[in-house]
Amino acid sequence: MKMKIKIDDRVTDILKSFKLPDEIGFGTTIAPVMITCDFKEGIWETPKLGPYGPLKLQPTAKIFHYGQEIFEGMKAYRVNKKGPYLFRPLENYKRFNSSAERMAMPFIPEDLFMGTIKALVDKVSPFIPNQSGDSLYIRPFMISTENHLGIAPSKEFKFIVVASPSASYFKKEKPIDVFIERFYVRAVEGGTGQAKTGGNYASGLVSAMKAEKLGYSQTLWLDAERREDCEEMSGMNLFVVKNGKLVTPALTGTILEGITRSSLIRIAKDHNIDVEERSLGLKELIQGVKEGQITEAFACGTAVILKSISSFGEEDGTTYKIKSKESEYTYQGEKVRGQIGIFLKEMLLSLQEGRSKDPYGWRVKVPTSVDSYQKVTKGDNQQVHLDC
């Protein structure tokens, strides 16, 4: 498939003058170019690659009033100058359209989604960090742009892709402490919990502030109806190791279906680690930690990859500290002992970064020569065809 894309004449000079700072952080260093594409009168227009900068929107644009917005989080890896590699990008594409359907937004074609992301990765590939654990974080998102204060779905939208050369999500290597949120809830059945939309995260910020004040790094959300079952964390899925088995809350419609989550489950099963996707009660979690049955816990997601949890805590200061213990699993045909979380993180990261073979076909190499694009027109903006 070929997708047309217009390239602003300023892009070449902007990229030539761009330099990475000594400390790139996570999500704070932004690539100097971005892609935008408008949806009007039921049609997606030709996407444009131009300088990163402010968007021009009217104060009455529906995004500001009714929150019609979705996004994805993706990464491109270029460790030791290999790649760049995307990781399971078609899963992001599917989830993006699933979120769009829930939020009454238009379907985006595969060639448009994949083509724009590959084009942006190609352009900024020289700025992708090459240290293990670092990456180019990619944020495709869609917002409603119709100027109308009536409460109704927008008829106009803007699709945008920006990117950020990024280091690890957490600055410190040590495990995190997690706050158990018993009052506020993240999602309810029939709501937007399984859609990747900004409102899900905005409603959790008040709990994030409370958790930080109490000395915690993340929030653990419970089910909205009874406040008895563990669901997920703020932007991350939850796993625990109980009696040597890997346990994660089952997808119920209130939990975001994490791509990292599903990848870890597949890798674990392929190494003879027992995996249970089921209801995980808060009482079971606390009791398991107290009695030493739960010997590991970790959060996972695109941004964080995998982060160990050292304890869960309450608002009154009560803390349930995990007593770490090695488990037995199979690696390269032999039984070994160790921390399951550490093993899974290394297996996943080496696959994402191109340091190991990819038996699943999850890794997608991005072509890195825009000079080979077929030029269609010349003028204020070049227009090119891109193989998707």
Image: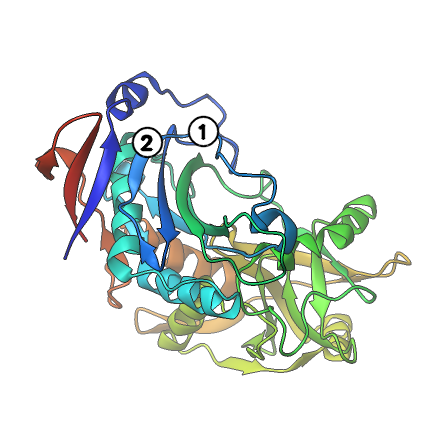
Secondary structure under badge 1?
loop
Query: Which residue is tagged 1?
Result: 53
Q: Tell which of 154 and 339 is nearer to you.
A: 154
* Residue 78 seen in the current view: no
Residues at marks 2 and 1 touching, judged by CB atoms closer than 8 Å: yes
SS under mark 2: strand
The answer to whether 381 is drawn above or below residue 200 in the figure is above
In the foreground, 241 or 254: 254
Residue at 28%, 25% (x, y): give it: 11
Height in image: 175 above or below 330?
A: above
Q: Amino acid at mark 1?
A: Gly
Q: Residues within 10 Å of mark 1 (few under 14, many from 20)?
A: few
Q: Is 204 left or right of 20, judged from the image as shown?
A: right
Q: Residue at x 30, y 39 (%)?
A: 48
Q: Position of residue 375 (x, y in %)?
A: 9, 36
Mark 2, residue position: 50
The answer to whether 272 is drawn above or below residue 28 in the figure is: below
